[in-house]
């Protein structure tokens, strides 16, 4: 797993949609690898990125907060490869920003993962407690 | 249109009494201008937010259910409207849990008994967001007829944040085809602001994480996430980012300032609540909409555009 600073720098310098898509996949590979799982080689809707996201969100509902970012990366890849001469500079810039957002989000998630989930679909720390403790905590008075 | 949205129980939540005061003010002003009535929930309490949820999710369910119990059982309301994404999300989550989880029902009944009020029963109240309230209570056509001060010439990036549509299973009314909200590409705010004359830009980060959860534990990550959203809005050509959540709004504003101070990265896009933009289109004065309370100076931009 490469340091995120290096991946983010590469995203900032990438000049092709293929390279940006590969870097976005690398970001998700870092997340999946850090959880002790081997990153999938499968695709969803033609994109390994979407399959990696699905794999990375398994059991971590708040990871879905980057689902649309991944889909937008795939959408911009399609725009850039299917219509390579149309607004290329703008779309490449936008794809870079999307890949950067994905990297920042995953980097933040990796840093705070041990603290529990804080995001939209929060999975609280106490759900990981043994059932007896959970029961005890809901006995208020 | 939904007739029962024209008079709803109103749950402002804690943020709208603090950093989101202007959102509270502008929501009420827009409601008044559109003939929509709000009955504030009596003696409302915190929805449980994220903090309580992490300590004990059943307590969060109870706290949200108490608000719904007052609205349904005491005020006899059919609909409660929450403009804050966090409150809206938590009330919807409590509704879902009470409908599907017997333990949640048992805890809510026990705690409601101790607190001396009737427990909330799932299915007796509909929780909606301020976007639903205006979109389904008034609609774009009526809104267009009432516009006195078009937002024409204003380029807007609509930012919904992460909690308005996630997790999808607690929003069964969304993704139901034409006329309903989409969880993957929400559009209600786009629709309303377009009706008010604004030009919506293609903004691919409309539901992306703003890093709100990292604000205290890792401010730099929040700042960089926000900076990326601001840059994307600017790259999309937006003058303004329209918001519909007090946490997202204050996060965007505060981290815009912090990005300049700490990272030396200046962005100029402004943040305005969608209710402030709608209010201006309806001819309400910027002061009554709390525009002067925003950190981001939206008023100067609106004047520059000849809108305010």
Image (cartoon, coloured by chain):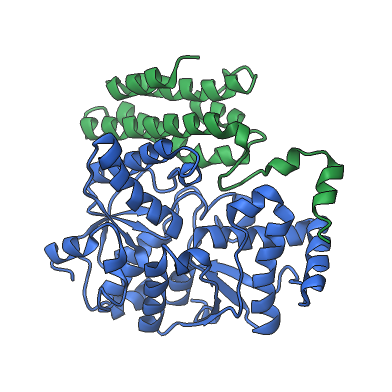
Chain colours: A green, B blue
Give the camera-side residue of A132 and A86. A132
Residue at the image point whose x is 40% and y is 68% from the top: B21
Can residue A18 be seen here? The reply is: no
Residue at the image point whose x is 51% and y is 59% from the top: B85
Give the quadrant of the C terminus of chain B.
Answer: bottom left
Residue at the image point whose x is 87% and y is 43% from the top: A132
- Residue located farthest toward the right when viewing the structure as drawn: A132
Residue B86 vertical position relative to residue B23 in the rendered view, above or below: above
Percent across and percent down for residue A2 are 46, 14
Residue at the image point whose x is 49% and y is 60% from the top: B178
**Residue A12 falls in which quadrant of the image?**
top left
Residue B103 vertical position relative to residue A109 in the rendered view, above or below: below
**Residue B245 falls in which quadrant of the image?**
bottom left
Would residue B175 appear left or right of B222 to someone viewing this image? right
Q: How many marks?
A: 0
Give the camera-side residue of B133 and B265. B265
Percent across and percent down for residue A31 are 55, 25
Percent across and percent down for residue B302 are 19, 64
Percent across and percent down for residue A96 are 32, 30
- Residue located farthest toward the top when viewing the structure as drawn: A1
Would residue B162 appear left or right of B275 to someone viewing this image? right
Residue A72 vertical position relative to residue B115 in the rendered view, above or below: above
Can residue B288 be seen here? The reply is: yes
């Amino acid at each position: 797993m490469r340091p995120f600073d290096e991946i983010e720098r590469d995203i900032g310098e990438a000049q092709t949609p293929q390279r940006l898509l590969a870097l976005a996949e690398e970001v998700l590979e870092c997340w999946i690898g850090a959880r002790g799982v081997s990153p999938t080689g499968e695709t969803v809707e033609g994109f390994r990125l979407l399959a990696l996201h699905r794999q990375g969100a398994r059991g971590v509902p708040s990871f879905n907060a980057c689902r649309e970012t991944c889909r937008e990366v795939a959408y911009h890849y399609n725009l850039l490869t299917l219509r390579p001469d149309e607004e290329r500079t703008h779309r490449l810039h936008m794809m870079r920003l999307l890949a950067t957002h994905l990297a920042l989000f995953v980097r933040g998630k990796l840093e705070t993962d041990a603290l529990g989930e804080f995001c939209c679909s929060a999975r609280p720390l106490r759900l990981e407690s043994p059932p007896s403790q959970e029961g005890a905590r809901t006995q208020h008075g | 249109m939904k007739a029962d949205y024209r008079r709803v129980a109103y749950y402002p939540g804690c943020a709208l009494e603090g950093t989101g005061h202007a959102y509270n003010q502008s929501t009420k002003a827009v409601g008044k201008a559109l003939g929509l009535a709000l009955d504030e929930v009596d003696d409302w309490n915190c929805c449980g937010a994220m903090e309580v949820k992490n300590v004990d999710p059943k307590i969060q369910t109870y706290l949200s259910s108490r608000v719904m119990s007052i609205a349904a059982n005491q005020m006899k309301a059919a609909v409660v409207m929450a403009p804050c994404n966090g409150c809206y999300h938590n009330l919807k989550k409590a509704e879902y849990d009470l409908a599907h989880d017997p333990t949640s029902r048992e805890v809510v009944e026990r705690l409601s008994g101790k607190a001396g009020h009737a427990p909330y029963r799932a299915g007796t109240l509909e929780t909606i967001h301020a976007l639903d309230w205006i979109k389904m209570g008034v609609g774009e056509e009526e809104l267009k007829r009432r516009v006195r001060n078009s937002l024409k010439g204003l380029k807007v990036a609509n930012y919904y944040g992460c909690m308005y549509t996630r997790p999808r299973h607690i929003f069964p009314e969304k993704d139901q085809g034409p006329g309903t909200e989409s969880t993957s590409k929400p559009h209600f705010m786009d629709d309303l602001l377009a009706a008010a004359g604004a030009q919506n830009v293609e903004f691919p980060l409309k539901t992306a994480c703003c890093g709100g959860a990292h604000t205290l534990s890792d401010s730099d990550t929040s700042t960089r996430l926000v900076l990326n959203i601001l840059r994307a809005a600017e790259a999309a050509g937006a003058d303004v980012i329209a918001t519909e959540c007090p946490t997202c709004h204050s996060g965007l504003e505060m981290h815009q300032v912090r990005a300049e101070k700490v990272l030396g990265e200046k962005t100029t896009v402004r943040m305005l609540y969608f209710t402030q933009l709608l209010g201006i289109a309806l001819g309400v004065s910027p002061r009554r909409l709390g525009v002067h309370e925003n950190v981001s100076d939206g008023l100067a931009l609106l004047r520059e555009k000849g809108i305010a």
